[in-house]
Amino acid sequence: MHNNNLINKGHLLIVDDERVALKNLEHVMKKEGYEVTATQSGVSALNTLEKQSFEVVLTDLRMEKVDGLQILHKCRETYPDTEVIIITSFATLESAVETMKQGAFYYIAKPFRLDEVRKVVAEALEKIRLKRENRALREQLDRHQGKIQLITRNPAMQHLLKVAQQIAPTDCNVLLTGESGTGKELFAKYLHAQSTRRDGPYLAINCGAFNDELLTNELFGHEKGAFTGATTTKLGLLEVAVGGTLFLDEITEMSPTMQVKLLRVIQEREILRLGSTQPIKTDVRFIAATNRNISQTVQTGQFRQDLYFRLNVVNLHIPALVQRREDIPLLATHFLQKYSLLMRKNVTEIVLEVMELLQNYDFPGNVRELENIMERGVAMATEHTLGIAQLSDDLRTLNIRTFRRQDGKIPSWEEVEQDYIQWVLEETKGNQTLAAQIMGIDRVSLWRKLKKLTKIKENIIN
């Protein structure tokens, strides 16, 4: 059982002809929970690599008969996913550049700090994990080419997907809520693709982009001669979408007059073209979306309660990207692949510094903003990696989190203060004295606030 846990964390091969250094590294890495194979011989390391693979290889550069570069070449040829970390006492700029050029993950000079080794190994394993997820993602996309894919490993999002799969074939109307850019339209397309209507049309309209006259024309159409300039009959979306799905984005921007017209369509399942007296039967599934607090708009009378009930048969609330940070690396690499393909570039890797910045950013624009960042990054990239230089100036210099509404509500000062304290402590690596100085309060005041924060967390858990 213990062995299984170690294998899950990672299997390391350590090669060093200095016995003391080898034993020291072996002991530290085993203590960290890795499975470790250690050898003092480069020849022995090559023989071992003939028989099995490792996630990470830590090897000395200068050794007799077989050196670290030969081990690096062997790994590149046989195990392209394996990351190699070169460790040597012969620390020169030339040798460091050479090993990195030939594919080494990192270069550490002796005497090394154990904390540095731990950090580098963890980063190498994270890169491997992302590579494997990317490969699995590509395979998944190949298997489901043409199908709508929602990429996530967040438990809340995975639950939403299960609910979406359950309700998709039922033909009930669905209301999608969540901040702008969270992927509500992608969810709408997914519901359509999973439904019995998937062979029918999927049409979308932004209700906030038209005045009443234009929206009526777009939804209901008109007869020839219905108004000046109507030289032909036009079919509205409610007629064209028969047998399929109509996605109504920003539904809360629809005027009271249009809300009455839409309610009648849902209740009577028929439409009337402008200029016609003959009703036309329609069979459309409605999926509506809003980034506003729709319950609040119902309470204030801005949105009809009866229409709300008709559309909100099932509500799917899409969480903000900041609430599912574990999806950021997966989505970032997905968009990297997407735009590398579209722009015919070979940008295959996101440097660790960029990934850390993305994971610490609050994304007020959510997934749409992340996609825009990656599109710009690929466009600016001149090599196979996307680095800090490819990001916008604003993002590169960003060092504080954003204020944002939560489910349509402005957060209280206490909620903002909690986030700020946590952020400052992260930035100061837990140094409470320094954090208190930065915040302009004394150490005792910070201690009291942290104690209060701990009690709040305990109450939430209990």
Image (cartoon, helix red, strand yellow):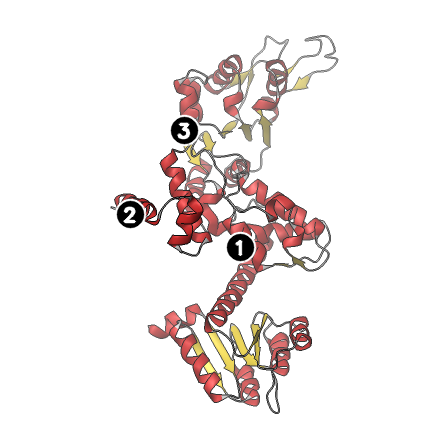
Secondary-structure class at tag 3: loop
Q: Position of residue 173 (x, y in %)?
A: 46, 29
Residue 89, image x and y in percent? Answer: 57, 82
The amino acid on which the numbered mark 2 sits, given as a three-letter code, is Lys
Element at badge 2? helix
- The mark found on residue 313 in the picture is 3
Real-space Cα distance between discs 3 and 1? 40 Å
User: What's the residue at 32%, 47% (across, down)?
Assistant: 450
x and y percent of residue 236 in the render? 62, 20
Quick one: label 1 or label 2, which is nearer the N terminus? 1
Of the 4 image quadrants, the one containing the N terminus is bottom left
- Asked whether 168 or 124 is in front, the reply is 124
Residue 110 relative to residue 8: left or right? right
Tell me if mark 1 has few (under 14), some (14-19) or many (20+) residues whose alpha carbon lies within 10 angstroms of its own: few
- Disc 2 from disc 3: Cα separation: 43 Å
Earlier in the chain: of badge 3 and badge 1, it is 3
Q: Against 121, is 252 above or below?
A: above
Q: CA distance from mark 1 to mark 2?
A: 29 Å
Please name the amino acid that badge 3 sits on. Val
**Does residue 146 appear in this view?**
no
Q: What residue is shown with label 1?
A: 356
